[in-house]
Image (cartoon, rainbow, N blue to C red):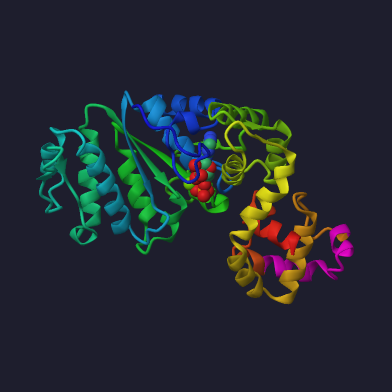
């Protein structure tokens, strides 16, 4: 498809196409390899490294010919009904683009009293499901899965933020889903999630239904050189230039986390006029821009912390981007934090407030911009 070039090629929060997507070639190959060999896959990483983007990239560029692909993000779902609602809409949305399929779909999905209407301009069928129409989520789910089972092409369903199912209102939801998924022949699943301990225990705890039912993929930051080259290529394409050392400094400052890098480079791009150059001088203005845009949120967040939590967080921010063992005697002495147990209590509170996140036993600031703000003020 020929698309008008984007006014700013550093895209945030959505997948456009491979022009604007950096690297992930090896990861794409691995994911494709698992999928074509019939394996269900779980992708894990820290927040905002690019799990969702990777799935979209692989769907759009690698699997689109041989598979029907579907993706739902269940982050906001509280129960099975809401999840089935998203899935039904995704399946209908994709299939409505194919003029002959919806009739067949309606024959299979009988629990929904949906009718097809035809768009007057495009002539294509339109299907839509309201949440209220899903009276028996389990029945509708069976029907949708049965439909996918009869599809000519193999089907891949990606369920993003899959750890949410552990908090669904219904009991035994994992067992129910596992049983359904287990019997499918034409349909495979990709699960993704960032709450590491939640997602891992779903699949690695022998007492739980999904135990040993997937292969894991651990996503790491994009390679630094690959990211530098990606940025330089996109700048060149717009007749601009970016200095390698600037990208490299931003990469280090944001620990290679894709979302912050894209935010930074989106801003860097605006700083270069056509034919212009952005170099190291832009580093501080870029950071200031990112931090200032969230100043009010950060002030409120800071005000909601206890004194001890503030002190511990200030200490972390001062050391940032170096990560600390928060209860080490060295760290405690340097910042006058008194006892390890009082630090532990503060850290626990900060985790409950979502300010710190646990990843493989290390505590990370959840929001790096908040760290920079603390460092600055
Ligand atoms: N390879 C890439 N090249 C360019 N941009 C990317 C790439 N991967 C992800 N992004 C962008 O980085 C940001 C974070 O990516 P994404 O949302 O895929 O991460 P995630 O791991 O799913 O995050 P979360 O944990 O919040 O669900 C998004 O704005 C996305 O568009
Ligand atoms: Mg995601």
Q: In this view, does 5 lie to the left or right of 176?
A: right
Q: Is residue 269 magenta?
A: no
Give the main secondary structure of the magenta stretch.
helix
Q: Is residue 237 above or below residue 12?
A: above
The magenta stretch is: 330-348
In front here: 109 or 130? Answer: 130
Give whichever of 4, 99 is nearer the camera. 4
Residue 197's place in the image compared with 256, above or below, is below
Q: In which quarter of the image is the N terminus?
A: top left
Q: Which residue is drawn at 54% across and 31% down?
A: 22
| Quarter occupied by the C terminus | bottom right
Compare residues 16 and 49 and report the one nearer the observer.
Answer: 16
x, y percent for residue 317:
75, 59
Residue 43 appears in view: no
Let me know if residue 91 appears in the view: yes
Residue occupying the point 57% across, 52% down: 197
Instruction: Tell me: 246 left or right of 114.
Output: right
Q: Position of residue 202 (x, y in %)?
A: 48, 49
Q: Position of residue 80 (x, y in %)?
A: 32, 57
180 left or right, relative to 318:
left
Residue 75 sits in quarter = bottom left
Find out whether residue 335 is within the magenta segment. Answer: yes
Q: Please tell me in which quadrant of the rendered image residue 191 appears.
A: top left
Q: Where is residue 58 in the image (x, y as percent from the top left)?
A: 43, 30
Q: Report the front residue among 178 and 272.
A: 272
Residue at 60% over, 31% down: 275
């Amino acid at each position: 498809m020929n698309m008008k070039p984007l006014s700013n090629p550093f895209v945030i929060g959505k997948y456009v196409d491979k022009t604007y997507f950096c690297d992930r070639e090896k990861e794409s190959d691995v994911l494709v390899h698992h999928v074509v060999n019939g394996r269900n896959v779980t992708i894990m990483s820290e927040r905002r490294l690019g799990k969702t983007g990777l799935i979209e990239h692989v769907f759009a560029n690698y699997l689109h010919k041989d598979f029907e692909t579907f993706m739902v993000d269940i982050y906001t779902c509280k129960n099975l009904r809401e999840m089935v609602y998203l899935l039904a809409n995704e399946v209908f949305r994709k299939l409505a683009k194919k003029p002959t399929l919806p009739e067949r779909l309606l024959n299979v999905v009988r629990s929904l009293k949906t009718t097809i209407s035809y768009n007057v301009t495009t002539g294509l069928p339109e299907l839509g499901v309201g949440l209220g129409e899903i009276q028996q989520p389990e029945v509708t789910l069976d029907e949708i899965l049965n439909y996918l089972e009869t599809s000519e092409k193999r089907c891949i369903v990606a369920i993003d933020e899959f750890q949410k199912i552990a908090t669904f209102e219904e009991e035994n939801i994992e067992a129910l889903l596992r049983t359904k998924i287990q019997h499918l022949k034409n349909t495979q699943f990709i699960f993704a999630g960032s709450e590491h301990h939640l997602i891992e225990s779903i699949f690695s705890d022998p007492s739980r239904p999904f135990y040993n039912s997937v292969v894991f993929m651990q996503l790491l930051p994009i390679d630094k050189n690959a990211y530098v080259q990606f940025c330089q290529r996109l700048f060149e394409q717009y007749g601009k230039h970016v200095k390698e050392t600037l990208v490299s400094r931003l990469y280090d400052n944001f620990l290679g986390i894709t979302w912050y890098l894209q935010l930074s480079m989106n801003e860097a791009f605006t700083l270069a006029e056509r034919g212009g150059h952005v170099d190291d001088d832009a580093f501080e203005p870029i950071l200031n821009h990112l931090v200032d845009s969230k100043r009010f949120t950060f002030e409120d967040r800071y005000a909601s912390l206890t004194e001890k939590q503030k002190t511990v967080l200030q200490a972390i921010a001062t050391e940032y981007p170096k990560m600390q063992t928060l209860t080490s005697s060295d760290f405690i002495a340097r910042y006058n934090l008194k006892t390890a147990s009082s630090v532990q209590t503060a850290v626990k509170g900060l985790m409950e407030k979502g300010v710190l996140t646990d990843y493989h036993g290390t505590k990370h600031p959840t929001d790096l911009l908040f760290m920079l703000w603390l460092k600055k003020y």
